[in-house]
Image (spheres, rainbow, N blue to C red):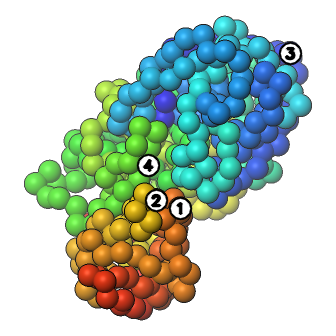
Amino acid sequence: MLILSALAVMALSAQDTFEVPFKMGENAIIVDATVNNHPLSLLFDSGFAGSVVADDNINLGEPDGTINLRDFVGQFQAKTVKIKSLKLGSVPIQVAEPEAVEQPAAHLTEAYDTHTDGILGFQAIENYVTEINFQTNKFIFHPKSYDITQKTPDNKKTFLVKMLPLGANSVELSVLTDQGKKMILALDTGNAFYATTHRDVLERVGLWDASKDPKFLSQSMVASGPVATWEKKLQGLTIFGVPVPTSYWDVIDLPSSDADGDGTVGIQFLRNFNIMVDYDRRRVWLENFSGEVANEPEGSVGIFADPDKARGIVSIEHVAPGSPAEKAGIARGDHLLEIAGTEVSPNWTLRQLATKLKGKPGSDIEVAVSHDGSLARYTLKRMALFNE
């Protein structure tokens, strides 16, 4: 989630309703946009407070300044370019005093396994009553006169929740534990996971024992770089007003960069709902059309490898204790050669490697590794490596 100073965003016509289709990637909303007459494919990230981030290889104009951005764990600086024109699909969007942020966007494509030229942020939609309709894959932009507070929820399939008075250009909502303790998480379509929080947050609300370390560690990519993460099974939560008996969260093993926020709820939860955001009235409407609210743990063998293009190898950097890989004798420093009969390439991304190793818990996968120059082949049974 990126945060910067608020800019006013004005609709072309405050009285009209517009529809703009989007495409669903593996875990991302992708919308066609035109910025300064350049056609772009943008990942919609409601956790990014600005209007547009564009890959710095795309020439949107001369940079006119810099801006400081922050994500889950760090802060970094990027150049800015004035936005002279912005369209979502064929719909012109007028932005007052607009800025496009320029930064490398290749990691976005790598992280989501879906091509993107950058990010479309919250400012592009906040001046509408915006519906994110996952059922039909389209945005519906209602005029501000459309009052969702007049809608009556049944609190079974439909929910009307109040935004918290926190954050600039973000949708901050409550998540409650079964003991009634509160976490503050943003509605974040740019988070590819179910939900992401921090270890110290779980300790604060009594969901993790501070004296214990997680058994199974992994690694995830955020804008500022790779971070140590682990998966945690949580029970009895109420997420944005929705009761969720069991869910599996991605936990960052570092404190948050934002003292007001405890993390974000991501696309794997949100895609079960048609969502309406009324920023002025500080309300969010959720309509559960899928019948699902939870997620399932993925199966893993416990190998975390790093492609090294310079050396032309894929080195195993971490093997989870108690994992199928450790039990088979695979160790840190071994070179990963094959996955399921396919030769591993040092040009693969971290996500490509992780995706090929993961699968349904209980399923088998064959891997080949080199240990001190000797070839070894293993058939490993994936297991769910979550922390209780």
Is the residue marked by circle 1 packed among few (<14), some (14-19), or many (20+) residues within 10 Å? some
Is residue 342 among what the camera can see?
Answer: yes
Indicate the secondary structure of the residue bearing disc 1: loop
Q: In the orientation shown, which residue stands out farthest toward the left?
A: 211
Q: Earlier in the sequence, mark 4 or mark 3?
A: 3
Question: Which disc, if any, is residue 221?
Answer: 4
Query: What residue is at 42 percent from the left and 81 percent from the top?
Result: 382
In the picture shown, does residue 139 fall above or below 68?
A: below
Q: Nearer the viewer, residue 379 or 299?
A: 379
Amino acid on which the number 2 mark rests in the picture:
Lys
Is the residue marked by circle 2 packed among few (<14), some (14-19), or many (20+) residues within 10 Å? few
Query: What residue is at 70 percent from the left and 9 percent from the top?
Result: 96
Residue assigned mark 2: 309
In the picture shown, does residue 121 fall above or below 247?
A: above
| Label 2 close to label 3 by CB (< 8 Å) | no
In the picture shown, does residue 304 fall above or below 68?
A: below
| Label 4 close to label 3 by CB (< 8 Å) | no
Q: Nearer the viewer, residue 43 or 330?
A: 330
327 sits left or right of 379 in the view: left
Residue assigned mark 3: 13
Amino acid on which the number 3 mark rests in the picture:
Ser
Q: Earlier in the sequence, mark 1 or mark 3?
A: 3
- Where residue 2 sits: x, y (%)? 49, 30
337 sits left or right of 388 in the view: right
| Label 2 close to label 1 by CB (< 8 Å) | yes
